[in-house]
């Protein structure tokens, strides 16, 4: 039986289930005892995840692509305000019922069908895990070069740095989810200090903010700007499209809906905008100082002449990247993989699967240049995640009006079993959203469908799902 206090779930009796193959300790709903995250904790979580090197590179990539500072900042700010909406909406079920993302997906996709969106999201998370690990690994390699200069001549240095940092991540994965609290407490502040330090360096060496912020846009016509802006905005939304799905993994620990909503609102957009400004300003300054656009902060730090300062900065970067990687790119895929077989796959095993797949996705190729990062990686996977968000929101808020049976979410014979565990109407809606968005990648005349992949996929899947479910 579900028990509620002020409309929030505090206890669920699952002992009556005949078969417990759909539940383990990591997927079970939280109760009032676990609801310890207030507004500050939710905001701190987002600040810890937002203040990261990919955020910096996201902003600097827009500058490298031709935007001036205010165009880049506007694009990032708008994208984060947009993605905050599905973030808060999908978080609602997590807080109300104490369930993680793959369990929420069972309501719309079915108890077995939920593995489809869970695995799609997990694969993207593996890619992000690899990206963050590659960034941290290159910082590790640069740190070794400072200590042992001859290491720079070793061609396998970057690969070894990558594997060393990968091992650090695996260590915290094995320690379990509680290790994240320690990392979140110390990681982001260090990186913020490094960012502010780079900003001061840029200000001093470029002659103040005037020359930095006066760097003109490379677009000579409005048409050129819009051609770059549209997929860039989709990329900004795509940046957090992953977390907009699995945010229940975190908000299931929130004290109330107010805590999760306000915490996300004050934690996500401001931290992204502030740290993005640092990336924008510093990248603009590199044009003035070095005569070239340097969008990778690790490469930039390697050009500094003071080894001690660079070493401190790199250590901070390594710690902060480790923080974000564990929180943003391990928690969700670990739960997603566990959803495949809750009796056999724990959080630790799911995390280890993530770590291995992250290597196989060759993150060094995803970070080969800003175009591959923004328009290939971010926009590309958003075509898969937008439709999932549309289906989850349509099902929970419109079709079910926020009412779920928690026991049935964990029952192989409940109302969410549909046909052999699959709700094929959700699968059809997902396929429709993905395929229509990807048509733009194949047919040049409708390229806008791909450029707006997240938005197009969300809208199509939302409408198709509700149309099919009402029949």
Image (cartoon, rainbow, N blue to C red):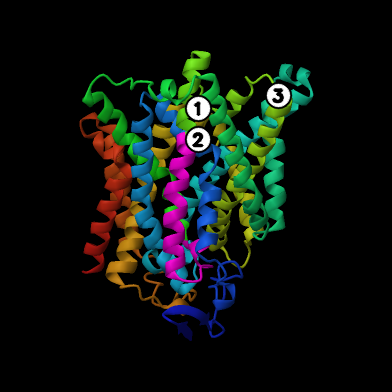
Instruction: Report helix, strand or loop for mark 3.
Output: loop
Residues marked 3 and 2 touching at CB (< 8 Å): no
Instruction: Tell me the chief SS of the magenta region.
Output: helix
Q: Cα distance, mark 3 to mark 1?
A: 30 Å
Of the residues tagged 3 and 1, which is closer to the observer?
1
Q: Is residue 366 in sight in this rendering?
A: yes
User: Relative to 317, is 401 on the left or the right?
Assistant: left
The image quarter in which residue 462 lies: bottom left
Disc 2 residue crowd, few under 14, some 14–19, many 20+, Cα 10 Å = many
Q: Cα distance, mark 2 to mark 1?
A: 9 Å
The residue lying at 25 percent from left, 33 percent from top is 447
Sequence-wise, the earlier of marks 3 and 2 is 2
The residue lying at 67 percent from left, 27 percent from top is 158
Give the labeled residue for mark 3: 156
Q: Residue 282 carries which label?
A: 1
Instruction: Report helix, strand or loop for mark 1.
Output: helix
The residue lying at 34 percent from left, 38 percent from top is 74
Residue span colored magenta: 248-277
Q: Is residue 114 in sight in this rendering?
A: no
The C terminus is located in which quarter?
A: bottom left
Q: Which mark is residue 56?
A: 2
Above or below, 36 relative to 75 = below
Q: Cα distance, mark 3 to mark 2?
A: 27 Å
Disc 3 residue crowd, few under 14, some 14–19, many 20+, Cα 10 Å = few
Above or below, 281 relative to 338 = above
Sequence-wise, the earlier of marks 3 and 1 is 3
Q: Which of 210 and 72 is in front in this view?
A: 210
Of the residues tagged 2 and 1, which is closer to the observer?
1
């Amino acid at each position: 039986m579900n028990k509620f206090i002020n409309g929030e779930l505090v206890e669920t009796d699952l002992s009556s289930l005949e078969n417990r193959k759909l539940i383990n300790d990591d997927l079970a709903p939280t109760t009032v005892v676990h609801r310890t995250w207030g507004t500050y904790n939710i905001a701190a979580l987002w600040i810890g995840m937002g203040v990261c090197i990919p955020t910096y590179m996201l902003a600097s990539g827009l500058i490298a692509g031709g935007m001036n500072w205010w165009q880049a900042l506007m694009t990032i700010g708008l994208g984060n305000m947009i993605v905050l909406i599905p973030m808060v909406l999908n978080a609602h079920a997590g807080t109300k019922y104490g369930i993680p993302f793959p369990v929420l997906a069972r309501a719309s996709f079915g108890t077995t069908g939920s593995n489809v969106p869970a695995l799609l999201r997990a694969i993207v998370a593996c890619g992000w895990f690899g990206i963050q690990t590659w960034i941290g690994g290159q910082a590790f390699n640069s740190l070794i070069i400072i200590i042992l200069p001859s290491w720079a001549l070793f061609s396998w240095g970057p690969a070894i740095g990558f594997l060393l940092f990968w091992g650090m991540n695996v260590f915290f994965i094995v320690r379990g989810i509680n290790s994240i609290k320690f990392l979140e407490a110390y990681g982001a502040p260090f990186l913020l200090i490094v960012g502010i330090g780079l900003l001061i360096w840029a200000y001093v060496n470029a002659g103040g903010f005037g020359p930095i912020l006066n760097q003109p846009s490379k677009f000579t016509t409005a048409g050129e700007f819009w051609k770059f802006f549209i997929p860039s905005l989709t990329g900004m939304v795509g940046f957090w499209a992953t977390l907009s799905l699995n945010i229940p993994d975190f908000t299931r620990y929130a004290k109330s809906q107010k805590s999760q909503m306000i915490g996300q609102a004050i934690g996500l957009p401001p931290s992204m905008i502030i740290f993005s400004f640092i990336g924008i300003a510093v990248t603009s300054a590199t044009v003035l100082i070095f005569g070239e656009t340097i969008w990778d902060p690790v490469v930039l730090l390697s050009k500094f002449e003071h080894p001690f300062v660079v070493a401190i900065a790199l250590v901070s970067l390594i710690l902060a990247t480790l923080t974000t990687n564990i929180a943003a790119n391990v928690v969700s895929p670990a739960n997603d993989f566990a959803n495949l077989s809750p009796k056999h796959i724990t959080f630790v095993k799911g995390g280890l699967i993530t770590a291995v797949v992250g290597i196989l996705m060759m993150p060094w190729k995803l970070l080969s240049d800003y175009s591959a990062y923004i328009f290939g990686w971010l926009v590309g996977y958003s075509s898969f995640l937008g439709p999932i968000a549309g289906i989850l929101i349509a099902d929970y808020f419109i079709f079910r009006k926020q009412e779920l049976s928690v026991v049935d979410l964990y029952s192989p014979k409940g109302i969410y079993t549909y046909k052999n565990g699959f709700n094929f109407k959700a699968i059809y809606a997902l396929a429709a959203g993905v395929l229509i968005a990807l048509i733009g990648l194949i047919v040049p005349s409708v390229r806008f469908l791909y450029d707006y992949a997240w938005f197009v996929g969300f809208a199509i899947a939302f409408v198709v799902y509700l149309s099919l479910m009402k029949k």
